[in-house]
Amino acid sequence: MNVVYLHTHDTGRFIQPYGHAIPTPNLMALARGGALFRNCFDAAPTCSPSRAAMLTGMNAHASGMIGLAHRGFALQDPTQHLAHHLHSHGFETVLCGIQHEIAAGQAAALGYERLLSAPATPGAAEMTGAQGQARRMMAQDLANAQAVADYLAGPHDRQFFVSFGMFCTHRPFPAPDADIDPNYVQPPSPLPDDPAIRLDMAGFITMARCADACVGIVLEALATNGLADDTLVFFTTDHGVAFPKMKCHLYDPGIGVSLIVSYPGHGQPGQVIDALVSHLDIYPTVCEITGVPAPRWLEGVSLVPLLDGTTAQVRDEIFAEVTYHAAYEPLRCVRTPRWKYIRYFDDFGLVVKPNIDDGHSKQLLLKHGLAEARHDPAEMLFDLVFDPAERTNLAGRPEFAAVQSDLAGRLERWMRETGDPLLQGYVPKPPGARVNLKWALHPNEQEFES
C-alpha cells in the first residue's frame, strides 16, 4: 500500500470539517470518505519539534529536536524518520514542498530518495512585501501540488511514500481574496472581535482555501491514475494557528490539530472519532496499515483499533512541550479527556513576545499593553468539561489538590521516563543555534542570545 502525507503549516483545526466557516471542500470530501479525529493533539506546538515528534514517533525532546531546524537545532538520529524507515522497507520516498525536520538541503538524510520541484510561477518576482511573499508561497504550493500530481501519473514499480508539505497557512497572510469580506469573518477564540483581527483571519481563510485546492489536485490525481484504492492518505498540520495564545502555547488552540485518515479497507467512511490521540500515534498507525514492522523506539500507539471500531480509547493522556521556538520558553503539559495541567519552568515574568508571530492581531495586542503583560502562572490546571476555553486556573485550590497532584506526578514521571533534559534545569541551545532574547519584540528582530 502507498502512503501520501499531506500537511500544512499553522492550521490547527480551522478547516470546514471541524465546523468552521472556512471553505475547504476537498478536505471535507476526504473526511467524509475516511475518518476525522476530533481530539488529536501535537507533541509540541512549534514547527520543527512538532514535525520531528510525529515523524520519528518520539516526543520532541527524545528526538533531540527542541527548537527550530532552520535556526540550528537538529534531530539526534535522522534515520529514525518515517521516510527513512519506509525506504528501508522498499518504499520509494518522495518529498515535495516543505519539510521542517532538518536544515534546508539535507532532506536526503531523512530518507527521501526523490525530491520533486516545481518551476517558479510566472510573475512571482514582481510580488513584493509581506503580502507579495504570501501570494508567492501560495502560487508555489499550487505548483508543487501539480508536481505531485505529475509524479502520481508516472509509472511506479514500488510502493511509494509521498510527503507533500504546503507553506499555507503560515504567516505572512495575503490580502484577502475579493470575495472574503473581513466584516463577516469570525475571529478565532480567545481573541477580541476587532477589525484588525477579522482582517487577519480573512487572510488566513484565503490561505486555507489555497491549501484545500492543493489537496484537491493531489486527491484528483490519485483517483485519475487508479491509485486511490491502494493508498493510505493522511492529512494533518503541525500545530495551532499563528495567533496569540495559540501557536507555541500549550492551550488547546495551540496543541489541537486536524487529523484526517483515509485508506482502502477502512469500512466506516465518514467516521468521526472523539478519542484522545497524539501525533505520536501516526507512525505506528502507518506501520500497521502498510504491514511494515514498527521500530522499537516508537512512543505512540496505533490508531487502527479506533479506526476498525474494536476499541473506543487507546490512551488516557497526551503530553506536549515547548522548549525553544524563536526564544526560550520551557513549558510542559499533560492533558486527559477531563483535565489539563501546564507547568512553566522559567522565572522570566513577561510574555515571551518573539514566540508570537507578528501580524495584525499581535499589533493590536501590543497597542493595548502586550509588551508589559505578565507571563502565565507557573502552574495551571483546567477542567476541560466546565471550562473548555481554559479561562479559570484551578491550580492551588484545595478542592482540586488531588487532581493537581495526580497530573503533576504523571508529568514528572513522563519527563523522567523520556529523559527530558528540562529536569536538570535550564536547557542550553546547541552551539551555533540562533535564539532570540526573551525580551525581544518579534522573531525577525536581530536580537539573539550569544
Image (cartoon, rainbow, N blue to C red):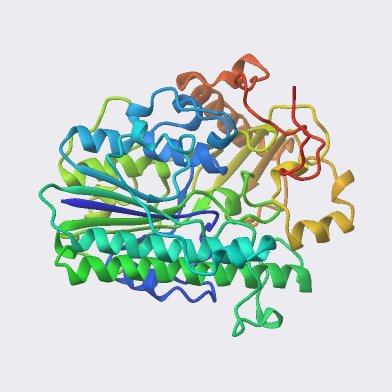
Is 167 placed left or right of 225 in the picture? right
Residue at point 32%, 52% (across, down): 312
Choose between 186 and 220: the one closer to the eye: 220
Question: Where in the figure is residue 397, as x and y percent of width and height?
Answer: 74, 38
Q: Residue at x 38, y 39 (%)?
A: 55
Q: Quadrant of residue 188?
A: bottom right
Q: Which of the image's four quarters has the C terminus?
A: top right
The number of callouts visible is 0
Q: Is residue 239 above or below residue 152?
A: above
Looking at the image, the residue that sits furthest to the bottom is: 179
Residue drawn at (27%, 39%) of the image: 113
Which residue lies at the image location 53% right of the left edge and 34% below the top edge? Answer: 69
Can I make out residue 70 in this image? yes
Q: 223 and 246: which one is in front? A: 223
Depth check: give the residue in front, 401 or 19.
Answer: 19
| Residue 244 x %, y % | 71, 53
Q: Is residue 260 above or below residue 317?
A: below
Q: Position of residue 269 (x, y in %)?
A: 25, 68
Relative to 209, is 55 on the left or the right?
A: left
Q: Nearer the viewer, residue 335 or 364?
A: 364
Using the rendered image of the protein, determine whether residue 189 is visible from the camera's viewpoint: no
Residue extending furthest toward the top: 424
The picture quadrant where one finds residue 332 is top right
Q: x and y percent of residue 5 in the render? A: 33, 52
